[in-house]
Amino acid sequence: MRAPPPTLPGRRAFLGTLLAAPALLSARAAEAEPVDVELVLAVDVSRSVDQEEQELQFRGYAAAFRDPKLIEGIAGGPIGQIGVTLFTWSDWHIQEHLVPWMKIDGPAAAERVAQAIDAAPRRTWLYTSISGAMDFGSRLYGRAFEGTRKVMDISGDGVNNSGRPLSEARRDALEKGIVVNGLAVLDRTPQPWSAGLPPLDAYYRDEVIGGPGSFLMVAEGFEAFEQAVKRKIIREIASAPAPGPLVERAYA
């Protein structure tokens, strides 16, 4: 038996909901503050990253936001401010959003971001799901800011071994207008399970990065991570990034 058609009051309520939806979306968009870049930082904390290496990563990100060159780069943008957030990732279902969206419009704001990174908990998990990180990071945009550019910065030291195919997650992120950059950390003491896998820098270049102006930064060992991430973020916030994939290397 077919359900009876809605009553007139019911129809009016339904139509009211449809008409209100665009207004709600517009209100949310109006609340988003404009920035030059919405920058999502995704940090690998899988088992291949030991406690010392994880600390080098966090210190590197904090140091980047204390670098005067980064502040100068932000000030040089058309709007003069960016939005930044940071999460850690491992297995397909494990992502921890440790630093909420924060605006950087000068040294004081950048220091607050650095302090938030310093205070973030350090935890290690198991597998490496770059696809899970891409999916999680893609859902973070538009929550607090409206960026002229949307950039996802994925750092890691291993290939995708958990979650859905990386190619699918990458395709979906690119379709949303997100530029995916990579920071591949070449471990000087490779783990036994890495035997037979493709070189990490080539893997990140071919399978991870994508979008206009995307590029790959390669850290030659975790000791080079701080230098690599400083150069990388300064590059990412540039008002006119060079088009096409670009591979750079940082050494300790």
Image: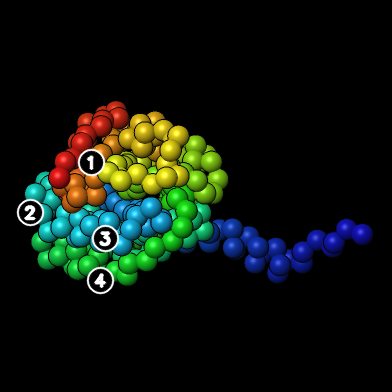
The residue shown at (37%, 57%) is: 45
Residue 52: x and y in percent read 26, 60
**Separation of marks 2 and 4 at Cα, in angstroms:** 21 Å
Q: Would you call the spot at circle 4 few (<14 residues within 10 Å), some (14-19), or many (20 or more)? A: few
**Separation of marks 4 and 1 at Cα, in angstroms:** 26 Å
Front residue of 16/117: it is 117
Residue 95: x and y in percent read 44, 60
Q: Can residue 22 be seen in this view?
A: no
Residue 231 numbered tag? none
**Separation of marks 4 and 3 at Cα, in angstroms:** 16 Å
Q: What secondary structure is found at the residue carrying circle 3?
A: helix
**Separation of marks 3 and 1 at Cα, in angstroms:** 16 Å
The residue shown at (71%, 67%) is: 10
Q: Would you call the spot at circle 3 few (<14 residues within 10 Å), some (14-19), or many (20 or more)? A: few
In the picture of the structure, the residue carrying the numbered disc 4 is 119
Image mark count: 4
Residue 41: x and y in percent read 31, 53
* Quadrant housing the C terminus: top left
Q: Which of marks 2 and 4 is nearer the N terminus?
A: 2
Residue 83: x and y in percent read 26, 56
- Colour scheme: rainbow
Check disc 3 and give the amino acid type: Glu
In this view, the mark in front (4 or 3): 3
Q: Earlier in the sequence, mark 2 or mark 1?
A: 2
Front residue of 71/142: it is 71
**Separation of marks 2 and 3 at Cα, in angstroms:** 26 Å
Check disc 4 and give the amino acid type: Ala
In the picture of the structure, the residue carrying the numbered disc 1 is 220
Q: Would you call the spot at circle 2 few (<14 residues within 10 Å), some (14-19), or many (20 or more)? A: few
